[in-house]
Image: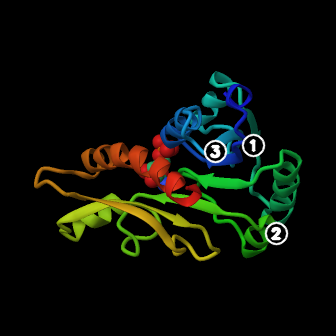
Amino acid sequence: MEKLTGLKKIKTSVFISGTGSNLKNLIKFSKTKKSPISINLIVSNTSKAKGLKYADQYNIKKKVFNFKDTKITEKNLLTTINKNKIEFICLAGFLKILSKNFIKKFGKKIINMHPSLLPKYKGLNTHERAIKNKEKYAGCTVHYVTSKLDSGKIINQKKIKIAAKDGSISLAKKILVQEHKLYPAAIMKIFN
Ligand code: GRF
């Protein structure tokens, strides 16, 4: 696609820890003509991440870093990122917190998808907590990453109504559908 159109897309790395449905969605988006990004590197903190299969499926480079020693890992991660000329990072279900040092040294945009209406429900188990607190609405948010958990500037957000019959699993499913629309929209908003 890049060669055909002559367009130079922003070299992007997606960081995952699990299923990778957002990763798959971003890969598909990256292959569209309108996408400002290409996905050149998939990073995971565990070799067990199911989403790593998309690296093979779509022929994208993948790297696993065990975050046992964060300092050493981040140093190696930065080397890999620089070697691959990565200019933009999307976190998609990535369960490690990147240090202030890493964020500063990378020096370019890092964004994250979070399954809640931030600033409400930072951290894990967002849907369970929202239901337990009898919230009327839930949703998802794309935001810039800072070293403070789920606290960077919000790029975009989608709100949905929690149905009376919703449990955390049905709510997660509904929100995931919205995440898959919201993440590409956030990227278009940033780069257009
Ligand atoms: C998503 O709900 C995302 O918002 C959260 O973790 C989940 C990851 O799902 N950060 P997937 O791995 O992209 O399928």
Residue type at numbered disc 3: Ile
Q: Is residue 177 visible?
A: yes
Q: Residue 20, position in %: x, y?
A: 53, 39
Looking at the image, which residue is at 51% across and 70% down?
150
Looking at the image, which residue is at 25% across and 45% down?
170
Find residue 154 and name its label: none
Callout 1–callout 2 Cβ contact below 8 Å: no
Q: Residue 42, position in %: x, y?
A: 69, 41
| Residue at mark 2 to residue at mark 3: CA–CA distance | 21 Å
In the depicted view, which residue is nearer to us: 135 or 144? Answer: 144
In the depicted view, which residue is nearer to us: 176 or 95? Answer: 176
**Is residue 136 rendered to the left or right of residue 170?**
left
Q: Quadrant of the C terminus?
A: bottom right
Q: Residue 120, position in %: x, y?
A: 36, 74
Q: Which residue is mark 2?
A: 105
Q: Which residue is mark 1?
A: 64
Q: Earlier in the sequence, mark 1 or mark 3?
A: 3
Give the answer, above or below, for where 171 lies relative to 103.
above
**Is residue 165 rendered to the left or right of residue 11?**
left
Looking at the image, which residue is at 52% across and 74% down?
153
> Would the CB of label 3 be found within 8 Å of ligand 1?
no
Residue type at numbered disc 1: Val
> Would the CB of label 2 be found within 8 Å of ligand 1?
no
Residue type at numbered disc 2: Lys
Q: Earlier in the sequence, mark 1 or mark 2?
A: 1
In the depicted view, which residue is nearer to us: 31 or 117? Answer: 31
Q: Nearer the viewer, mark 2 or mark 3?
A: 3
